[in-house]
Image: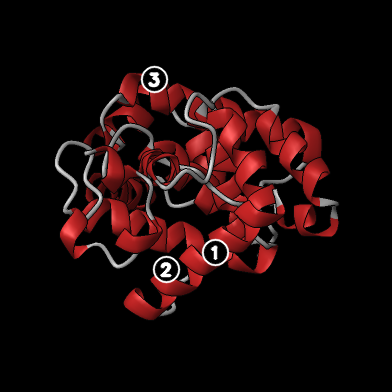
Amino acid sequence: MKNLQIRALKIHQTLLEAFGEPIWRNPLPAIDELVSTILSQNTNDINRDRAFESLRAKLPTWEAVRDAEEEDVINAIRPAGLANQKGPRIQQVLRAITAERGALNLDFLAGLPIEEARSWLTKFNGVGPKTAAIVLCFSLNMPAFPVDTHVYRVTGRLGLRPEKMTVEQAHPYLESVFPPETYYAGHLNFIRLGREICHARKPNCPQCPINKLCEYKDKT
């Protein structure tokens, strides 16, 4: 594991040299990020943002979203796709948070140990490890490493995780491979690498900034 951790840090540093220190959009409040990330499932960032803006325009508070007619929420988030699933899921999560906390605010999670905060979020239907990690990392500045499809693919090709490991298993595994201070930038730079160079079907290996550190190129 020690050698893997050294190699992972070298890959991280090389991506920082190539891409710079990434900055995501302005952080959203945790409850906003939770809804946004549910909307992002199985769609792209543009459609997610369109749906989020549409939802906020039609139902300006999360209490209004929670208490709205189901059909109104579904119609508002259609740009994100799978609206018939995501609409009820968002309302169910908002109702469950209200029932437990009495208010729609997740800032209290920042005061919990990371695993306790993660467990609290993932107990809700539709909130998996990636959604929880995004909320914890980007809204609450807590040490969580979100693994989306790009991160999963790239880390697999790089040999940073076992090939047969599931996405769910990859979250705690990669958190053990990378130091916590790298999670934010590492997540974003792996996504950029996956989108721009390390494509699913035809990776552009000659243009990859970490080509010399990659195991995948030797298999092609």
Could you give the CA–CA distance between mark 1 and mark 3, rounded to whole angstroms? 29 Å
Is residue 83 visible to us here? yes
Which residue position is annotated with label 3? 85
Q: Position of residue 68 (x, y in %)?
A: 46, 31
Q: What's the image's color scheme?
A: secondary structure
| Eye-nearest disc, 2 or 3 | 2
Could you give the CA–CA distance between mark 2 and mark 1, rounded to whole angstroms? 9 Å
Q: Quadrant of the C terminus?
A: top left
Task: Give the residue type at disc 2.
Answer: Trp
Residue at x-position 77% and y-position 52%:
109
Task: Give the residue type at disc 1.
Answer: Tyr
Q: Position of residue 209 (x, y in %)?
A: 30, 68
Task: Determine whether label 2 and label 1 are within 8 Å by CB.
Answer: yes
Residue at x-position 42% and y-position 72%:
14
215 left or right of 44? right
Under tag 2, what secondary structure?
loop
Task: Give the residue type at disc 3.
Answer: Gln
Q: Quick one: label 2 or label 1, which is nearer the N terminus?
A: 2
Which residue position is annotated with label 2? 24
Q: Quick one: label 1 or label 3, which is nearer the N terminus?
A: 3
Q: Is residue 95 above or below residue 218?
A: above
Decide which of 11, 41 is in the foreground and name it.
Answer: 11
Which residue position is annotated with label 1? 184
Is residue 22 visible to us here? no
Q: Is residue 139 above or below residue 173?
A: below
Decide which of 52, 164 is in the foreground and name it.
Answer: 164
Rate crowding at label 3 as few (under 14), some (14 to 19) or many (20 or more) other CA atoms within 10 Å. few
Under tag 3, what secondary structure?
helix
Decide which of 111, 98 is in the foreground and name it.
Answer: 111
Q: Position of residue 126 (x, y in %)?
A: 54, 26
